[in-house]
Image (cartoon, rainbow, N blue to C red):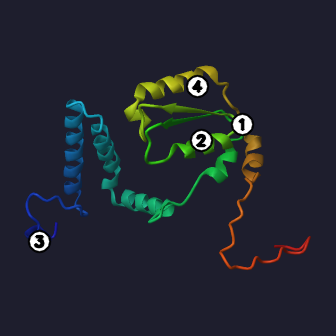
Amino acid sequence: MSGVLALTTPPDVVVLGPEWPTRALLRAALDRAGEQMRARGSRKGVYLQAVARAMRPLGDAAARRAFLQTLRAVIDVRGQHVSAMDRLYLLGELPTLIVWGERDNTIPIEHGLAAHEQIPNSRFVTLPKAAHFPNLEDADGLAEALLDWLDTTEPGLIEDSEWGQIVGARAPRRQRPAPEGATPSPAPPSGSPE
């Protein structure tokens, strides 16, 4: 911490700067708070512990830069602006299990249902006790869904020679609506390059 910042910051305030010990202390405090909440019977402590675990790799400057670059590529002030919907065709007939927490307020369940509709050989399972972290909030329910799927699903196989055809296939492109008041451009004549 810079000398000026150290002099102007009250002693009980944690500063989130580039100083690794400060981040380590914050991570440890979150983990301890989560542990105490869980000991008192609050299931929400698991979230604090998940945040503490997620912060661990961000101690490295290169990891922080990579994380921020990825974050900026998919999220802006209006929310998430990328989707896997145009790539789900790559799964083809591969067996796919989609598990969704019914209490997930981070990503609406409709997103999972839309993915399920796009993947021909998928199974969609919801977990009533789980929100966004089924592995933490309903580990038993997730394990049960996974074991049932493994027991009742034939494995999929894609030969190396088939990958080119699968990846080369294109999902139908969505047409973007023209801005209001814009005149649509005429289609190119048949046979001419676009």
Foreground label between 3 and 2: 2
Residue, disc 2: 113
- For residue 76, above or below residue 63: below
The N terminus lies in which quarter of the figure?
bottom left
What residue is drawn where x is 47% and y is 64%?
78
Looking at the image, tell me whether mark 1 or mark 4 is earlier in sequence order: 1
Q: Position of residue 94 (x, y in %)?
A: 68, 35
Q: Sequence order check: which comes first, mark 3 or mark 4?
A: 3
Q: Mark 1 points at which residue?
A: 93
Q: Residue 149 carries which label?
A: 4
From the viewer's perspective, is 98 left or right of 175? Answer: left
Label 3: which secondary element:
helix
Give the vertical position of 153 relative to 182 (above or below): above
Tell me the number on the disc at residue 3.
3
Task: Mark 1 and mark 4 in contact? Answer it, CB < 8 Å.
Answer: no
Q: What element carries label 4?
A: helix
